[in-house]
Image (spheres, rainbow, N blue to C red):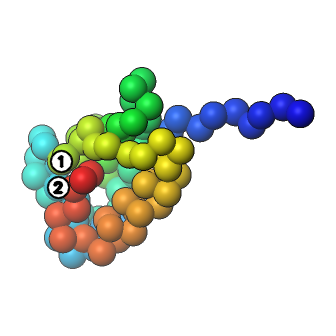
Amino acid sequence: MNNPPSVNSYVDRVTAGPGGAMTDEVGVVTGDLIVATILRSDGISVRVAVQHSGSETWYTLAGSPAPVPAGRLAAYHRDLLGRIRRGGGTRAT
């Protein structure tokens, strides 16, 4: 039996709630965003980047890199999307 390939990143679109998501470079970003959650080579932390839909510029989500329990990348990404939808200056941690 073959093991499924390992997934090391997730990218999704999300609409930020009131107060948006906090970035290191430009502060709060709001509106329709693309969120990329990328497992780092250490296997226990992620880099999270966001961009406005239709833009080419990526920003680092404040608090990134963030710890993630082994094998929980998908759950972390889903939770992060939910937090961004709620807004409030969401951070990676």
Task: Note whether residue 25 is visible.
Answer: yes
Question: Contact, CB < 8 Å: mark 1 with mark 2?
Answer: yes
Q: Nearer the viewer, residue 9 or 35?
A: 9
- The quadrant holding residue 49 is top left
How many badges with numbers are in the image?
Answer: 2
**Residue sticking out furthest to the top:** 41
Q: Residue at x 22, y 62 (%)?
A: 90
Q: Amino acid at mark 1?
A: Ala
Would you place residue 22 above or below residue 69 in this image?
below
Would you place residue 31 above or below residue 76 in this image?
below
Q: Residue at x 41, y 63 (%)?
A: 79
Question: Circle 1 is placed at which residue position?
Answer: 62
| Residue 22, label in figure | 2
- The quadrant holding residue 85 is bottom left
> SS at mark 1?
loop
**Mark earlier in primary sequence (1, 2):** 2
Residues packed near mark 1 inside 10 Å, few (<14), some (14 to 19) or many (20 plus): many
Q: Position of residue 28 (x, y in %)?
A: 14, 58
Q: Position of residue 63 (x, y in %)?
A: 19, 46
Q: Position of residue 18 (x, y in %)?
A: 21, 75
Q: Residue at x 38, y 45 (%)?
A: 68
Residues packed near mark 2 inside 10 Å, few (<14), some (14 to 19) or many (20 plus): many
Task: Note whether residue 55 is visible.
Answer: no
Q: Residue at x 24, y 42 (%)?
A: 64
**Residue sticking out furthest to the right:** 1
Would you place residue 19 above or below residue 61 in this image?
below
